[in-house]
Image (cartoon, rainbow, N blue to C red):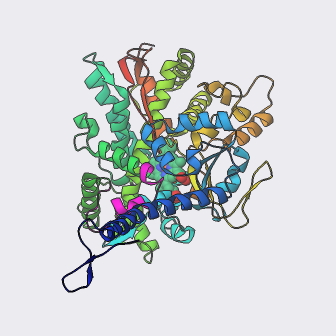
Amino acid sequence: MASASPAADGGILPTEGSDLTALLAGIWGNKLSALVLGPTVAVFLWFFVAYQTSPLKKYPGPFLAGWTNLWRVWQVISGEYAPRMKKLHEKYGPIVRIGPNLLDLDIPELYRVIYGTDGKWVKSDFYKNSSSIIDGKITYHMFSEVDPTLHALIKRPVVRHYSVPAVLVMEPLMDTIIQEFIDTLQKRYVEPKKTCEFGEWLSYYAWDFMGMVTFSTKFGYMEKGHDFDGTLAIADQSIDYLALCGQMPWTDYILDKNPIYPIGPPNIGNVTRIAVQNLTARLKGEDKNFTEGSPDFLQYFIESKSTHPELVNDGSVIGYLLLNLIAGADTTAITMRALFYHVLKNPRVFARLQADVRAEFAPFVPAPHTKARALPYLEAVVKETLRYHPAVSMIMERIVPEGGLTLPDGSVVPAGQMVGMNPYIVGRNKDVFGEDAEEYNPDRWLQREGESEEEHKERMARWGQSLLAFGGGYRICLGRNLSMMEVYKVVPTLLASFDIALEDPNEEWWTCSRWFYRTKGVICKLKPRSS
Ligand code: HEM
C-alpha cells in the first residue's frame, strides 16, 4: 500500500523515497521489462508454435535446422555446404529437413516430378535476389524470374539461339579463342619452362570464350594473364551473395533492394560497360569486331528484337548478354578445372584419355566438335566430372504445388512447402552409381563386360536422371549445349598439344562449396607434346 505525507496545502504529495516513488519506479521498470520481454516471449512462442505445428516436423534433420534458416546460413558460410549435406544424408537417410520449410531429397526417382516440364513446380524465392533495380523497379532475368508465365516470356525470344545447331554455327569464333589459348600457354609457360596456374588460366579462357561468343569481343584476361579489372572476383562475390541471402530471401530487401543505402554485391561494371558499348556499336554498324556471316549471341538477340518486338528491347538485350557471362563463364571454368584436376590425379584415367585423344587429334589445331563428341572415353570423363564435381553444389529449391508431393515412404509434403535436390548429393547416390560412388571413375559410364548395347542405353537413361549438373525440366540450364561444346573442344585440344602434369601430384586443391563449387590450385607443368 502507498503511503503519503501531509503537505503545506494539506494535500497528499509524494516525497522522495516514499513508497509511491518506488511504485512508479516499479511500474516503469515493469514497462521496460515488458517492452523487452514481451517481444522476446512473442518471438519465442511464434517459433515454438511454428515448429510444433510444421507439417515437416516428422522428417529427420539437425535440430536447429527445423527452427531457423540461420542454420543454413551457417552451412553456406562454412564453404563446405555440399559435403556437410552429404554427411547429413548418410546419417538421416534420403529425406533431410534442412530448414523450417525445406526438405533436401536424395530420391532420383522424383527428378521428373520436381524438375518437370509442366510449369507446376515453381522456383522458390531463393532465386529472386539475383535481380537488379532498373529505373527504380526490381527487374528479374531468366534465372531469377520465378513466375512461370513471365519466365516463359523472357525465354521465348532467345531459347532457339542456344540449340545445338545454333551454337554449332559459332564454332569458328570458338576456334579463334581456343587457338589464342594454346598459343598463349605455349609462349608464357611451355617455351620459358615456367610453372602454370592452370586452374586460373581455365577461368581466363572461359571468360574470354564467353565474351567472344556473346559479342565477338575478348575481355583480354588471356592477353593480360590476370583478373585485371577485378570482374572475376566480383562475380564470385555476387554468387556468394545469392547463396547467403537466398537462405533468408527477405534479407535482400534490407541489404540490396532498399532505396536508401543498398549494400548488395558490387556490380560487374566493366562487363556491363563492354556489353553496352558493343550493343551501341553494333546497332550503329560500327562494330569492328563483328564479321558478317559469323554470328554471335549479340546478333541473335538483336534479331529477337525484330522477331519479338513486343518482348525484346535494348534493355532486355543487355540483360541477355550479361546473363550469358554471369551464368556461363564460371560454371564452365569450374567444370574444366575439375576435369583436369581429377584426370591428372588419376594416372590410369589420364593415360587412357591422352592416348585416345592423341590417336585422333593433331597438336595446335582446335579440335572439331563433331569429332570430339565421337570419343567414348572423353564422353565418359565429361559425364563423370559433371557427376562428381557439379558446378552448382546447392539444393535447387522448388515450391510444392497443389496436391502435395507423395514421398516413397507414403508421407505427403503439403503444398506451399519447399523441397529440392542437390546435384552433388544425387550424383553420389550409391543405389544408382554403386558402392564406389565416392570415387572418380569415368569407366563406370562405359559399356560393361557382358552388358548388351540395349542394357547400356537403358542404364545411361536411368543414370541421366541422377545427373542434375544442369538442373532439369522447364528451368534446365539454357547454356548447356554451349558449355558442353566448349568443354568437348578444349580438352582434346589441350591434351593433344601439351604434356600436362600436376607440379605436385600429392597436393590437394582448395574447394569452397556454396552455390558454385569453387576451386583453386591446379598448378601444372606444361611441356611440348612428347608422343
Ligand atoms: C558446365 C557449365 C554449366 C553448368 C554446370 C550450369 C548449371 C546450371 C544449373 C544447375 C542451372 C539450373 C539452376 C536451377 O534450376 O536451380 C542453370 C540454369 C541456367 N543456366 Fe547454366 N550452367 C552452365 C553453363 C551455362 C552457360 C554457358 C550459360 C549461358 C550461356 C548458362 C545459362 C543458364 C541460364 C540462363 C539458366 C537459367 C535457366 C532458366 O531458369 O530458365 N549456363 N545452369
Q: Quadrant of residue 522?
A: top left
**Residue 460 appears left or right of 131:** right
Q: Quadrant of residue 529?
A: top left
Foreground residue among 236 and 37: 37
Residue 260 in view in this figure: yes
Q: Quadrant of the N terminus?
A: bottom left
Q: Residue at x 70, y 53 (%)?
A: 112
Q: Residue at x 56, y 67 (%)?
A: 148
Residue 168 in view in this figure: no
Height in image: 456 above or below 423? above
Q: Position of residue 307 (x, y in %)?
A: 46, 72
Foreground residue among 12 and 256: 12
Please tell me whether residue 250 belongs to the stretch shown in magenta: yes
Q: Quadrant of residue 221?
A: top left
Q: Position of residue 479 (x, y in %)?
A: 49, 51
**Residue 345 appears left or right of 198:** right
Stretch in magenta: 243-264
Q: Position of residue 160 (x, y in %)?
A: 52, 60
**Residue 179 appears left or right of 80:** left
Q: Position of residue 342 (x, y in %)?
A: 51, 24
Foreground residue among 214 and 523: 523
Per the picture, the main secondary structure of the magenta-coloured stretch is loop
